[in-house]
Image (cartoon, grey):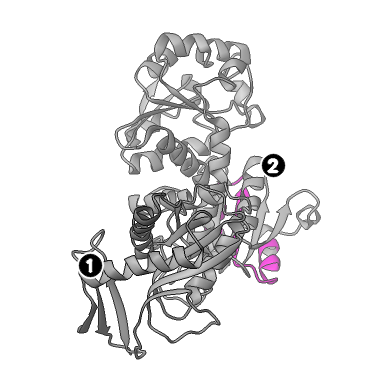
């Protein structure tokens, strides 16, 4: 796997999350009714940071939950490796809330599709909005994000690697080349 | 991470990693059971046969619920009312049902080894829901899950299984599983109910319940199985209760912190006093809830396993 470019560095990542937080507040006219849901694994850390930013701007922390949509995936029959499931941790009611679903990379849209099904099983939110750090294109489903950190046009042979200090050794986004058979 | 086998026949020689994976996966499903919509689409399109040649309430309902909560299609076979009464052999029954295209079979049978035999005549994933006096792996898994949930760990814990060990498949699966996870397992009961060979498995044997309680963190109390002729092994049910029954007095005297478990169904006033069965030391109904989560985990891990 070859690194082709560092697309966002740690300062850039901080600025981007700040902007995303402002956009979310602006669009929802405040943070009164919003709840954040981070998608495992890196979406969770991104959601944490956006939660901190919103708290700093609005003086009130929105609720934050973590979603694992593995059980709702559509590729159980075709995948070679069994995906690992982990626990969904959403301790608040979603009914009538404006749910901000947060993930690191938007690619085919299939994970988001699974997450939407999972959320609907948990309650009936007022709206579900989707916030993503990187949109790399190549959608296979009619899905778009409401808040985008950065659009990075990619080829199929490239991959977007998001690194976050919580589990990696730095904050950065890389564009890498993958070897496909 | 995947399980190392396509089947769950027992916990004998099942690697620690597999047990760990099942227990950890069950935690995910435990959360699903708390949701307003307690159903996920994961096993959509899979067909599961519940092949029950022996009576069961808890296990059969628990498996059926677990299957439905994973969106699988289920079929139920029970011996009474089936063609087994017309003289059809077990093998023919299974082959005929399998010809209807079944992906997984959950089997309970009075003969030990039937689940293993099924793996030889069928392509489905086989899950043992109790075979004779041999093993009942999902019960042991849910017992281990419940202990871990309550005590935070399994390693180093002293677990004593009390009662009719000789007739019990729950005991054997618990011994294999708990030992693999690093717990110390002992058994307690009248000598007529304890096979002496257990010592060769490294299992400590108690004949005195008070001593067993003093030296244990957890008691897994088994039912006296009167339908399996347990009556001939003890002078009377009342005498059994006097010598081995778990009562509030015994808990207070020997070990007030002890955790009491029971796989059900309970004979109140025999192995447990009614007071203990409803008391604060026991987690019997937690075990039942956890049983659904454990079975969902096993079905998920086998049903989506890649070759």
Query: Residue B20: x and y, percent?
Result: 37, 50
Q: Quadrant of residue B84?
A: bottom right
Q: Which mark is residue B32?
A: none
Asked if the magenta segment contains residue B114, the reply would be yes
Image: magenta residue range? B93-117
Q: Nearer the viewer, residue A78 or B200?
A: A78
Is residue B239 placed above or below A56 in the rendered structure? above
- Secondary structure beneath disc 1? loop
Query: Residue B188: x and y, percent?
Result: 44, 22
Q: Which mark is residue A171?
A: 1
Left or right of residue B176, residue A170 in this image = left
Residue plotted at (21% across, 69% down)? A11
Is residue B234 placed above or below A116 in the rendered structure? above
Q: Nearer the viewer, residue B142 or B107?
A: B142
Residue plotted at (52% across, 12% down)? B248
Contact? badges 2 and 1 (CB < 8 Å) = no
Q: Which mark is residue B55?
A: 2
């Amino acid at each position: 796997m070859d690194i082709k470019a560092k697309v966002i560095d740690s300062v850039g990542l901080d600025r981007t999350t700040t902007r995303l937080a402002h956009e979310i507040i602006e669009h929802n006219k405040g943070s009164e009714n919003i709840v954040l849901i981070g998608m495992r694994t890196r979406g969770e850390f991104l959601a944490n940071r956006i939660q901190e930013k919103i708290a700093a701007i609005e003086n009130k922390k929105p609720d934050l939950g973590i979603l694992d949509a593995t059980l709702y995936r559509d590729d159980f029959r075709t995948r070679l490796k069994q995906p690992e499931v982990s626990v969904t941790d959403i301790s608040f009611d979603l009914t009538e809330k404006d749910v901000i679903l947060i993930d690191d990379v938007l690619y085919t849209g299939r994970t988001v599709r699974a997450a939407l099904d999972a959320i609907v099983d948990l309650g009936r939110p007022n709206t579900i909005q989707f916030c993503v750090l990187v949109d790399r294109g190549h959608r296979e489903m009619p899905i778009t994000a409401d808040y985008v950190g950065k659009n990075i046009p990619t080829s199929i042979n490239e991959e977007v690697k998001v690194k976050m200090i919580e589990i990696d050794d730095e904050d950065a986004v890389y564009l890498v080349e993958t070897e496909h058979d | 991470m995947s399980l190392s086998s396509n089947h769950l026949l027992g916990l004998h020689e099942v690697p620690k990693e597999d047990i760990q994976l099942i227990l950890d996966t069950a935690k995910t499903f435990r959360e699903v059971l708390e949701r307003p919509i307690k159903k996920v689409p994961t096993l959509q399109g899979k067909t599961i046969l519940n092949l029950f040649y022996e009576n069961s309430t808890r296990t059969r309902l628990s498996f059926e619920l677990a299957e439905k909560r994973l969106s699988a299609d289920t079929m139920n076979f029970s011996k009474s009312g089936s063609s087994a009464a017309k003289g059809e052999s077990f093998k023919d029954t299974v082959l005929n049902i399998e010809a209807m295209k079944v992906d997984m079979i959950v089997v309970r049978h009075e003969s030990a080894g039937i689940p293993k035999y099924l793996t030889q005549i069928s392509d489905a994933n086989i899950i043992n829901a109790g075979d004779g006096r041999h093993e009942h792996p999902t019960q042991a898994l849910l017992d281990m899950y419940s202990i871990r949930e309550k005590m935070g760990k399994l390693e180093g814990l002293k677990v004593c299984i009390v009662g009719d060990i000789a007739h019990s498949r729950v005991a054997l699966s618990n011994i294999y599983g708990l030992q693999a996870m690093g717990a110390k397992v002992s058994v307690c009961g009248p000598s007529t109910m304890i096979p002496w060979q257990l010592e060769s498995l490294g299992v400590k044997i108690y004949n005195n319940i008070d001593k067993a309680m003093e030296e244990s963190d957890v008691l897994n109390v088994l039912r006296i199985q009167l339908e399996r002729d347990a009556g001939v092994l003890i002078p009377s049910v009342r005498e059994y209760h006097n010598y081995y029954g778990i009562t509030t007095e015994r808990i207070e005297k020997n070990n007030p912190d002890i955790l009491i478990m029971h796989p059900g169904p309970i004979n109140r006033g025999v192995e447990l006093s009614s007071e203990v069965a409803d008391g604060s030391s026991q987690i019997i109904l937690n075990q039942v809830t956890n049983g659904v989560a454990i079975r969902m985990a096993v079905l998920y891990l086998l049903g989506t396993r890649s070759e």
